[in-house]
């Protein structure tokens, strides 16, 4: 939260305060031009000007064109800097509104957010352009002043603008870079270490999954992949399996063999029901869509960071910080909806296997995940056998941190287990915990074998 | 039903997946080892750093200009008006000469040596283990400043600091957020070739990386996870 506030303060500084600081310079220039005009008016109004006054008047009249230019450039610089500050405030307001709307409505996150991002990018370009105009007006002003006062340290005013030249150079490069079209972002593809289970190969498993899909009122997966390394998940992104190198398009369900070999059939049904719930709610398609938006946003932010590294200047910062802030808001909205989707999917899991079984499976899966993590480098031979033996010998431990555990998933983040069980309206009592941390029974370890049998019922 | 699983398909699948996993891990391990070995082989065993002669030449030019002005003022008889200024310029000229004298051997002596494992600086009591470096920072002021931020428990040498105008030397700062070793030089020459600060940053970073690569390689070979 503190970081977020610090980020917001930085953003206010770069978007609003920096243009207001820049504003001081053209304001001073405007005052200087105005003073010269007043001097001329004062001499003209003098009833009896002396020789020195006449000389001064002649000099002032000889630089009328320059004075006119300076009198115009000062206000132009002021207007540009003031507009940049105003635009900065508008950008802040827009980010706030867009992120609020994205948290309120999923369709806005899905359909409007990238459009808003593009609008923001254009507004940030305009912000940089306005600051550039202000700086160019300042330098041009001093150029005209130097020309008129070359005989009296005119060069000094040009030298005074030297610190601005670096910023002008950086701003021009930033605009040129931003103007260039970004290449398309790489499509989202997953590589899974696992084996596909074709319908003809394991009809029993497929029939069971079809039944669960029917009970969940969800589309059936197009592919089932069984592996050793991840937890349960579904995806609509294209998948390449390793080592078979098969490319799978459509809906893929990943079943982790270590988990299904120690979970009961009912617990696994609850979890698969949860995963199929993601298909039912189009969460996997949304995940791919949001993943692509993330990549495109990061692509542009990377370009801004590259620009800042190449030409380190304060003028790069408003665009960079505003983009990062907008991205943070997008991430927060995405995570918010991700949690909402997880709760909804838990509801589907509960419909398939019952709320209590669903809660039990959540507890058991998080505890198994901890056990697998702790024995990751212990076994050399058969990891399934090693896991079963370990759970029979030592059982599973469900501690407070297990309840607050977030299941690792390759695409999005899940809410803590405790919150998910609360949402299922199931009390975390001793019986539930005892059931979740039981050693794997013969029933737990054999049912999936039966599913994999070529002619399983 | 239990008769149907006399050759359990789960065991067969588990065996296949385990073989796949082991093969993948072996392949990843082999790739990591090959990449680390190639990187280590690409880095020369030793780099020698000397400072440049910029302060030697700057001192000559500054002294010459200052003494020319002082000489012109004296011979043109304008000393009365600008006595203080002339004394100041003469003093600055002398300082310039001192700087020239101090940097008379600049670029000829090696002040820092980096190997695949250690950093040695001429005025430090012992070498610094590069594998203990956790961060690097480079600054260009009047001198090039290289900051090696070390692990909290790193064994640090002591520094015998030399006074003077921008000498090339190391400093050790054991206190603060993290212990640090700082190396200063005026201009840079690496293995006898003039180098920019960016070149020095790249070379120093490479030697720190190669020290970590050696440690990583040893860990992988001893069976540590990737």
Image: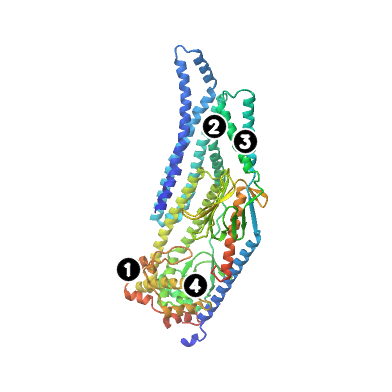
Quarter residue B21 falls in: bottom right
Closer to viewer: mark 1 or mark 4: 4
Classify 10 Å Cα crowding around label 1: few (below 14), some (14-19), many (20 and above): few
Q: Are marks 1 and 4 on the same chain?
A: yes
**Identity of the residue drawn at 55% across and 77% down:** B16
Q: Which residue position is annotated with label 1?
A: A425
Vertical position of residue B5 compared to residue B137: above or below: below
In whole angstroms, how far apart are the C-alphas of marks 3 and 1? Answer: 83 Å
Q: Which residue is mark 3?
A: B62
Q: Nearer the viewer, mark 4 or mark 2?
A: 4
Q: Out of B163 and A49, give the one closest to the viewer.
A: B163
Counting residues from the N terminus, which is met first, the one under dot 2 or under dot 1?
A: 2
Report which residue position mark 2 lands on.
A140
Q: Earlier in the sequence, mark 1 or mark 4?
A: 4
Residue count near mark 2 (Cα–Cα under 10 Å), binned few <14, some 14–19, many ≥20:
some
Tell me: residue B127, above or below residue A264.
above
Q: Which element is circle 2 on?
A: helix
- Residue sitting farthest toward the top: A48
Alpha-carbon span between mark 2 and mark 3: 36 Å
Which residue lies under the disc numbered 4? Answer: A376
Q: Are marks 3 and 1 in contact (CB under 8 Å)?
A: no
């Amino acid at each position: 939260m503190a970081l977020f506030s610090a980020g917001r303060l930085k953003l206010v500084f770069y978007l609003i305060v920096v243009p207001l600081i820049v504003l001081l310079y053209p304001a001073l220039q405007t005052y200087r031009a105005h003073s010269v005009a007043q001097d001329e008016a004062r001499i003209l109004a003098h009833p009896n000007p002396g020789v020195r006054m006449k000389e001064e008047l002649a000099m002032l009249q000889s630089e009328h064109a320059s004075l006119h230019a300076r009198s115009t450039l000062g206000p132009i610089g002021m207007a540009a800097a003031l507009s940049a500050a105003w635009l900065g405030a508008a950008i802040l307001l827009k980010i706030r509104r867009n992120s609020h709307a994205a948290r309120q409505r999923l369709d806005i996150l899905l359909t409007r957010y990238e459009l808003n991002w593009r609008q923001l990018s254009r507004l940030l370009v305009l912000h940089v352009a306005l600051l550039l105009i202000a700086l160019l007006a300042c330098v041009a002003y001093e150029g005209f002043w130097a020309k008129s006062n070359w005989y009296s340290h005119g060069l000094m005013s040009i030298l005074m603008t030297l610190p601005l030249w670096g910023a002008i150079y950086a701003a021009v490069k930033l605009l040129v870079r931003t103007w260039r079209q970004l290449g398309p972002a790489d499509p989202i593809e997953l590589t899974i270490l696992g084996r596909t289970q074709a319908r003809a190969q394991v009809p029993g498993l497929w029939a069971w999954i079809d039944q669960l899909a029917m009970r969940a009122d969800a589309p059936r997966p197009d592919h089932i992949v069984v592996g050793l390394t991840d937890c349960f998940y579904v995806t609509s992104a294209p998948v390449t399996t390793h080592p078979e190198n098969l490319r799978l398009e459509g809906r893929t369900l990943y079943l982790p063999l270590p988990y299904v070999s120690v979970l009961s059939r009912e617990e696994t049904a609850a979890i698969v029901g949860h995963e199929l719930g993601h298909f039912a709610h189009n969460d996997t398609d949304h995940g791919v869509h949001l993943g692509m938006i993330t990549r495109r946003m990061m692509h542009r932010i990377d370009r801004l960071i590259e620009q800042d590294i190449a030409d380190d200047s304060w003028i790069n910062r408003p665009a960079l910080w505003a983009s990062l802030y907008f991205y943070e808001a997008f991430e927060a909205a995405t995570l918010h909806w991700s949690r909402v989707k997880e709760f909804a999917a838990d509801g589907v899991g509960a419909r398939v296997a019952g709320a209590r079984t669903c809660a039990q499976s959540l507890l058991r899966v998080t505890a198994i995940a901890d056990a697998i993590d702790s024995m990751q480098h212990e076994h050399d031979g058969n990891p399934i056998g090693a896991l079963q033996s370990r759970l029979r010998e030592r059982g599973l431990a469900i501690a407070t941190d297990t309840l607050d555990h977030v299941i690792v998933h390759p695409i999005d983040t899940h809410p803590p287990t405790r919150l998910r069980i609360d949402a299922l309206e199931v009390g975390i009592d001793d019986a539930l915990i005892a059931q979740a941390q039981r050693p794997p029974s013969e029933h737990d370890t054999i049912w999936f074998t039966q599913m994999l049998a070529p002619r399983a019922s | 039903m239990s008769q149907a699983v006399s050759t359990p398909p789960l065991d067969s699948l588990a065996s296949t997946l385990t073989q796949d996993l082991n093969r993948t891990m072996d392949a990843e391990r082999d790739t990591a080892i090959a990449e680390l070995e190639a990187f280590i082989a690409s880095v020369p065993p030793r780099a020698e750093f000397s400072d440049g002669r910029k302060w030697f030449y700057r001192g000559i030019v500054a002294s010459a200009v200052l003494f020319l002005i002082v000489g012109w003022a004296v011979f043109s008889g304008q000393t009365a008006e600008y006595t203080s200024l002339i004394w100041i310029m003469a003093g600055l000229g002398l300082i310039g000469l001192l700087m020239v004298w101090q940097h008379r051997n600049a670029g000829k002596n090696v002040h820092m040596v980096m190997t695949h494992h250690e950093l040695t600086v001429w005025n430090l009591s012992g070498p610094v283990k590069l594998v203990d470096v956790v961060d690097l920072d480079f600054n260009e002021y009047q001198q090039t400043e290289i900051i090696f931020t070390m692990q909290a428990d790193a064994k640090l040498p002591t520094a015998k600091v030399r006074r003077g105008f921008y000498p090339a030397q190391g400093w050790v700062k054991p206190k603060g957020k993290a212990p640090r070793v700082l190396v200063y030089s005026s201009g840079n020459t690496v293995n006898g070739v003039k180098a920019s600060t960016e070149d020095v940053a790249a070379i120093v970073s490479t030697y720190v990386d190669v020290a970590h690569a050696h440690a990583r390689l040893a860990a992988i070979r001893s069976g540590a996870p990737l």
